[in-house]
């Protein structure tokens, strides 16, 4: 069975391609390279011994989609392609709505044209907004505090309406918590362009000596050590969740929102200390004021994923840090 993976050479997409290939799927990637490098195709080949076709193009380009769907017998789509930086979305909301919502509508139209009805969507825990109690359950009311988050809420709605309008459609709205870590090979991982917004790649660069210290944003949160708590999930576990979702869509119609998280939260300081363990020495940090828009705690309710997808995460925080550090060392040629 052939899966079209949009944004398939990005961080989560590349790990998902590996898991799909290892599960026996044929994979085709469409990516506009706005946040990725074509050499990731070589890395995926090194890991899996399979060369996957890469179409370089934009999901909003109907000519490119025609080419992909006519040259391949696509059975299902996993749609990662999107812009994902929260502060950037505040500065450039129209670009975010255009790429994320416009891209999703464009893919849905192509799927309708070519009779493809299975869709796995990259949603985010950000759709739970700032007012829900933890752990977040799939039936909680949705809201968002940024244009990025609003694009996810809007895309979930569009996909749910699409599935409601056509009984042949099967949609998994996967709400990711905080993916970190890297593939065990050290060949693929998270390597954001510019200064990372997210905690894990920033710690990795402090450990690699690129930045002098970590700024810990806020130590007065309502959490055990005062720093923000998040539900970190190993990116390989997250990728496995997509394979489980595709299996589920084989036998289920309609749209389902499903959390993908570990169901356990760690504070910023706990993640820093786990990374120090992987590196083998202390890492410098300083406390800074809270970052605008951050909340005390985010954590997934995981029962639905367990029940519907028979899914449980395998890797703990120590492996997330060991694997992330292996990738960072390889990337910067350390040791
Ligand atoms: P990423 O930036 O590494 O990957 C996205 C890929 O999509 C990139 O390779 C990029 O070049 C490509 N792309 C972007 N716009 C495109 C377009 N218009 N047409 C074709 N290709 C395009 O991001 P990621 O971390 O792998 O995230 C993947 C998805 O998961 C995104 O939808 C993101 O919003 C969602 N998500 C990510 C996180 C996270 O923390 N990384 C958390 C929740 C949800
Ligand atoms: N943090 C620091 N220092 C940093 C970066 C982050 O202390 O340099 C803290 C944050 O304040 C927060 C925690 O580390 O308490 C995690 O922050 P991240 O930026 O790594 O992750 P977020 O939970 O803020 O956001 C991520 C994705 C969003 C997504 C959200 C929910 O970046 O796209 O998870 O899925 F919406």
Image (spheres, rainbow, N blue to C red):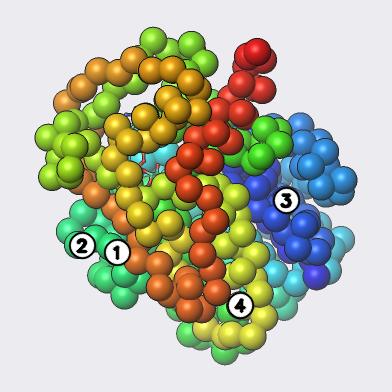
Tag 1 secondary structure: loop
Q: CA distance from mark 2 to mark 1?
A: 7 Å
In the rendered view of the protein, which quadrant contains the N terminus? bottom right
- Please name the residue shown 17% across and 44% down the image: 223
Residue 97 visible in the snapshot = no
Q: Is residue 237 left or right of residue 146?
A: right
Q: Residues within 10 Å of mark 1 (few under 14, many from 20)?
A: some
Labelled pair 2, 1 in contact (Cβ < 8 Å): yes
Labelled pair 4, 3 in contact (Cβ < 8 Å): no
Q: Residues within 10 Å of mark 2 (few under 14, many from 20)?
A: some
Q: CA distance from mark 2 to mark 3?
A: 34 Å
Viewer-nearest residue: 73 or 285: 285
Residue 130 is situated, as x and y percent measured from the top left of the image, at: 21, 54
Tag 2 secondary structure: loop
Tag 3 secondary structure: helix
Q: Is residue 71 left or right of residue 133?
A: right
Question: Which picture quadrant has residue 117?
Answer: bottom right
| Tag shown at residue 18 | 3
- Please name the residue shown 15% across and 40% down the image: 221
Viewer-nearest residue: 123 or 58: 123
Q: Earlier in the sequence, mark 4 or mark 3?
A: 3
- Please name the residue shown 12% across and 35% down the image: 220
Residue 32, placed above or below residue 165:
above
Residue 228, placed above or below residue 1:
above
Labelled pair 1, 4 in contact (Cβ < 8 Å): no
Q: How many marks?
A: 4
| Tag shown at residue 132 | 2
Residue for badge 1: 136
Q: Earlier in the sequence, mark 2 or mark 3?
A: 3
Q: CA distance from mark 3 to mark 1?
A: 29 Å
Q: CA distance from mark 4 to mark 2?
A: 28 Å
Residue for badge 4: 248
């Amino acid at each position: 069975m052939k899966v079209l993976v949009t944004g398939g050479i990005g961080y989560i997409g590349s790990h998902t391609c590996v898991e799909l290939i290892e599960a026996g799927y044929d994979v085709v990637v469409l990516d506009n390279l706005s946040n990725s490098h074509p050499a990731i195709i070589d890395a995926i080949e090194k890991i899996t011994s399979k060369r996957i076709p890469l179409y370089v193009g934009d999901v909003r380009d109907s000519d490119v989609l025609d080419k992909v769907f006519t040259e391949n017998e696509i059975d299902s789509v996993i749609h990662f392609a999107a812009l994902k930086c929260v502060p950037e979305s505040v500065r450039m909301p129209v670009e975010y709505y255009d790429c994320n919502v416009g891209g999703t509508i464009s893919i849905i139209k192509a799927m309708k044209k070519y009779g493809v009805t299975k869709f796995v969507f990259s949603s985010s825990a950000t759709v739970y907004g700032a007012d829900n109690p933890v752990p977040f359950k799939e039936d909680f009311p949705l809201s968002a505090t940024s244009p990025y988050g609003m694009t996810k809420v809007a895309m979930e709605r569009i996909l749910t309406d699409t599935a409601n309008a056509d009984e042949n459609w099967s949609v998994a709205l996967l709400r990711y918590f905080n993916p970190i870590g890297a593939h065990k090979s050290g060949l693929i991982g998270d390597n954001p362009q510019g200064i990372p917004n997210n905690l894990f790649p920033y710690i990795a660069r402090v450990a690699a000596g690129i930045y002098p210290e970590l700024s810990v944003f806020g130590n007065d949160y309502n959490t055990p050590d005062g720093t923000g708590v998040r539900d970190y999930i190993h990116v390989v576990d997250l990728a496995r969740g997509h394979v489980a979702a595709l299996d589920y869509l084989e036998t289920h119609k309609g749209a389902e929102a499903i959390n993908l998280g570990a169901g356990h939260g760690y504070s910023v300081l706990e993640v820093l200390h786990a990374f120090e363990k992987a590196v083998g020495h202390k890492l410098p940090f300083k406390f800074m004021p809270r970052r605008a828009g951050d909340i005390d705690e985010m954590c997934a309710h995981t029962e639905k994923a367990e029940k519907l997808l028979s899914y449980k995460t395998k890797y703990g925080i120590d492996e997330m840090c060991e694997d992330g550090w292996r990738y960072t060392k390889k990337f910067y040629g350390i040791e």
